[in-house]
Amino acid sequence: MAPVAAESSDDLRTLIQDHATLLSEQLQAHQLNTFSPDARKTIRHFSPAETAKLLEITEGYLRQVALEFPDLSTVSGLKKRSYSVEAIHSLRKRLDAGARGGKRYLPYRTHGEDLQVITVMNFKGGSGKTTSAAHLAQHLALRGYRILAIDLDPQASLSALFGHQSTVDIGPNETLYGAIRYDSKARPIAEIVRATYIPDLHLIPGNLELMLFEHETPHALLHRQQDDTLFFARISQALAPIQNLYDVVVIDCPPQLGFLTMAALTAATSVLITVHPQMLDVMSMNQFLTMTGELLDSISEVGASTQYNWMKYLITRFEPSDGPQNQMVAFLRSIFGGHVLNHPMLKSTAISDAGLTNQTIYEVERNQFTRSTYDRALESMENVNSEIEGFIRKVWGRQP
Ligand SMILES: Nc1ncnc2c1ncn2[C@@H]1O[C@H](COP(=O)(O)OP(=O)(O)O)[C@@H](O)[C@H]1O
Ligand SMILES: [Mg+2]
């Protein structure tokens, strides 16, 4: 019997290895076609109405300011002004420099306002974690905050959305693993952070290497030295040296409750749980909550803090015309009350289609879509992100 088993497992091994090689070659070729590695990702320009809203000024005032800084606005094909993200960033800085009467255009946090670390989690894949994390990070950066987005998922979908392909341009020790690993190859987090095409939005990409943290943690626990930092505290420890550079850190978690997720949870000041309002997803979330509760018990016993500024449920891919989904949302609201965000994220082909080319709704051009489809998706996303921005501001004691 034994030789047969050995032989078949050997076969399976080569088969799986061959398939993995084949598939990754093909996928890489496909990705290179869709998005060549040296093609820099860009973001669309913003209309005067959108720009004014982002800067919290009137369109009239924007016109006036733009006249003072003609270098900052660009003219699109339609002879209509539009603004690049760099232009919006410069306008914001100049407005802030000239501001009077305590008005601020740069919303950087000040003394007494702590860094906000938001983890986006749920162990159900497809619940919208990555989509929510990417759009939240971009929204906050467009609003002028200094943002660090961290991809903690070995599958690296967030990195892909930001134009970094895990197989092509994320090398060894270039993920958060590099800063939280247990051996002497650990490096300072500042060396790992990358800039993106949006000013004040930085990224720590992910790739399969992150899995090593899951594999190495049990060993590290067994052979622990007196002053080794335990697994759950390693992300907060890694973030400490750069914490003054950012206002908000957004962490996109893997779809599992492993050591990485626990470390993200410990580093977090707030938690966003994404949930697709369907029975199977909600049942899975039930297990997720039960397990997370137990894990929080264990890590609080060894000294982790379980104090959070807020914990919210975000309803994702919501279809208002779907009866059972509405019932499920009502059910969740009746149980969790104010912990469920007022605004759900609507299901929209504008989001999923943009995702196909590794783009967010903020990046794609409106004319690629049916206008109403695009506008509805953007409005829904803005409502969600503005609501979350409100919670952040409230923690800092500012007006929401
Ligand atoms: N609001 C939405 N409307 C339509 N499709 C969405 C929406 N949110 C997410 N998706 C799509 O659903 C899939 C899973 O979303 P994703 O954010 O990757 O989930 P997770 O990170 O939880 O696995 C992706 O293909 C994404 O484009
Ligand atoms: Mg994901």
Image (cartoon, rainbow, N blue to C red):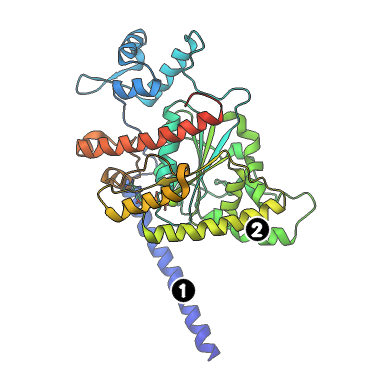
Identify which residue, 242 or 275, lies in the foreground: 275
N-term mark: 2 or 1? 1
State the residue lying farthest toward the bottom: 1
Task: Name the residue: 60% across, 30% down.
Answer: 114
Disc 2 to disc 1: CB gap under 8 Å: no
Q: Is residue 73 visible?
A: yes
Q: Secondary structure at mark 1?
A: helix
Displayed quadrant of residue 269:
top right
In the image, which disc is placed on residue 100?
none
* Amino acid bearing label 2: Thr
Identify which residue, 365 or 331, lies in the foreground: 331
Task: Describe residue 9's horizontal placement relative to residue 128 as left or right.
Answer: right
Task: Name the residue: 55% across, 59% down.
Answer: 290
Query: Residue beneath label 1, please?
Result: 14
Q: Secondary structure at mark 2?
A: helix
- Discs 2/1, front: 2
Q: Could you tell me residue 148's position as x and y percent?
A: 52, 36
State the residue lying farthest toward the right: 226
Query: Residue beneath label 2, please?
Result: 217
Distance from Cα at disc 2 to Cα at disc 1:
28 Å
Task: Name the residue: 75% across, 57% down.
Answer: 224
Task: Describe residue 302's horizontal placement relative to residue 355 as left or right.
Answer: right
* Amino acid bearing label 1: Thr
Q: Could you tell me residue 68's position as x and y percent?
A: 36, 7
Mark 2: give few (<14), some (14-19) or many (20+) Cα within 10 Å. some
Identify which residue, 20 or 265, lies in the foreground: 265
Task: Describe residue 174's horizontal placement relative to residue 140 as left or right.
Answer: right
Task: Describe residue 10's horizontal placement relative to residue 303 as left or right.
Answer: left
Task: Name the residue: 42% across, 51% down.
Answer: 332
Please tell me whether residue 198 is drawn above or below residue 271 in the rendered image.
above
Identify which residue, 57 or 369, lies in the foreground: 57
